[in-house]
Image: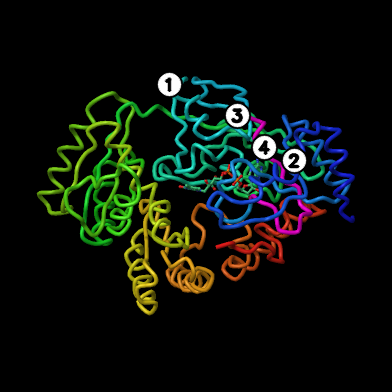
Amino acid sequence: MKANLEAFRKDAIALIGEPHVLAGDDAAPYEVDFWKQYAGKAGCVLRPADTAEVAGLVRLAAKYGVAIVPQSGNTGLVNGGIPDETGHEAVLSLQRLNRIRAIDPAGDYITVEAGVILADVQKSAETADRLFPLSLGAEGSCRIGGNIATNAGGVNVLRYGMTRDLVLGLEVVLADGSILDVLKPLRKDNTGYDLKQLFIGSEGTLGIITAATLRLVAPARERVTLWLTVDTPEAAVELFRHSRGVFGDLISSFELVSSYGVEAACTHLPGVRRPVADPHPWHVLIELAWTFTSGLRERAEAVIAMLFEEERVTDGMMAENEAQRQMMWRIREGQSEATSKIGYVVRSDVTVAIVDIPKLIARCDAFTVAYGPEVTVLPFGHIGDGNLHMNFVVPREKAKELAPKLFDQLFAEVDALNGSISAEHGVGRAKRDAIVPRKPAAAMAMMGKLKSVLDPQGILNPDVVVATALKNKPVA
Ligand SMILES: Cc1cc2nc3c(=O)[nH]c(=O)nc-3n(C[C@H](O)[C@H](O)[C@H](O)COP(=O)(O)OP(=O)(O)OC[C@H]3O[C@@H](n4cnc5c(N)ncnc54)[C@H](O)[C@@H]3O)c2cc1C
């Protein structure tokens, strides 16, 4: 069917009202991603208020053959939530679907609409004396629909799993405008295929998530945050192995930051200071939490004393108060922001077996030697999950030339270690072509079949995850 954008816009205005169908300057914030790496052009931006309006808009899109790009918080990092550059795609923003529908601390669940900001889901859970454990640097901006559509990870995966592990039910508008309601808050429901799983991590290509029932967990009433230093990535991995043996599931985060990254944060982020007196080659941030109000700190102190005695760490401190804890997390989460003051940051998100993390870092150090001082390797991230954000800081004027080469070399090393080129950020358009030779042919074929069954017209986020022609180009 030939796209008929003008007729679509007219009918969309009749359905949701003119103020909620944006164009021109009003559409601009929806056309560029958070880090301004990618830019596109929207035919229009739709801001429906509820599930019925989303369904009505999708029916119109199917009628007129207009492609829809779902967008929630627009913090995605793989060029999946903004339109391509043709001006033919309509962005469908979920931001007005922002109601908390239900919260039940006995059933340990919360039901929220797709446009609720992640930090607001966390706050609502707190008011019911529960924890919603999904936590990431973008939590003040990203929205739960986007988190589910990308199967987001973050800093608590080690203990609570990915977003997929936190979703009990979904409400989804399908490509024909019908509504799939599998929102029930049930822990057990073995009545055939678990359909919600299809949409988690599907990045807007199979349906539009309008609401979700999410699992809540016991609150973290006492938290201990440790900043420890080690000499090598091998020592960090050994510290992880040892700490898991001692603390088990009480560890919610285990993060690695390099010396370069820590010093960049202290230099370029206002008010940030290194938690330990001297520079060290590698820094580890560990967070422990439990439901009791006291006792964890004393236990952690005893373990830290042993860590020093056994020379497993070279220096370290325990956060004495919330301000110190925030400072530690600011260093970790401010890595991209701080280093972007130094140069252009070529961002990546890869995963290998935890024991292979030191090898991956060493191999990236080795292949970047050939570039001389122009390329600095900046590895940091969730090493407790085997997930590194292996970034490279390069001169801005060289970004377009260097980024593809660095990705190729990094991905080759990840392949050699049998890892994955996307740990938690997804595929989008940015990695769409790169996954093809890396996934089994049967898996790619099945993904294509699912797409054609659930979206036969190809109106839901075409070009993302499984399509063919790459249209958007990084702005760099
Ligand atoms: C500073 C910063 C830190 C980050 N840290 C992490 C991290 O630690 N871990 C991590 O996993 N990610 C991280 N991210 C990436 C990003 O925050 C996540 O991918 C997040 O889940 C995206 O949510 P969003 O609401 O912004 O989605 P958007 O960017 O709006 O959309 C992302 C994708 O989902 C689709 N989509 C959005 N809403 C829906 C919907 N309702 N139905 C169907 N499809 C939809 C879009 O089409 C797009 O393909 C970070 C990003 C930033 C900027």
Q: Is mark 2 within 8 Å of ligand 1?
A: no
The residue under the point 56% across, 37% down is 167
Name the element at disc 2. Answer: strand
Whichever of callouts 2 and 4 sits on the residue coming sooner in the sequence is: 2
- Which image quadrant is residue 296 in? top left
Residue neighbourhood size for the residue with mark 3, other residues' Cα within 10 Å, grouped as few (<14), some (14–19), many (≥20) = many
Q: What amino acid is at disc 1?
A: Asp
Q: Is mark 4 within 8 Å of ligand 1?
A: yes
Magenta stretch?
81-98
Whichever of callouts 1 and 3 sits on the residue coming sooner in the sequence is: 3
**Mark nearer the viewer, 2 or 4:** 2
- Which image quadrant is residue 439 in? bottom right
Name the element at disc 1. Answer: loop
Report x, y in % for residue 196.
Answer: 64, 41
Whichever of callouts 2 and 1 sits on the residue coming sooner in the sequence is: 2
Q: Is residue 23 above or below residue 391?
A: above
Label disc, if present, on residue 112 of the rendered structure: 3
In space, the residues marked 2 and 1 are separated at their CA atoms by: 40 Å
Residue 393 placement, left or right of 262: right
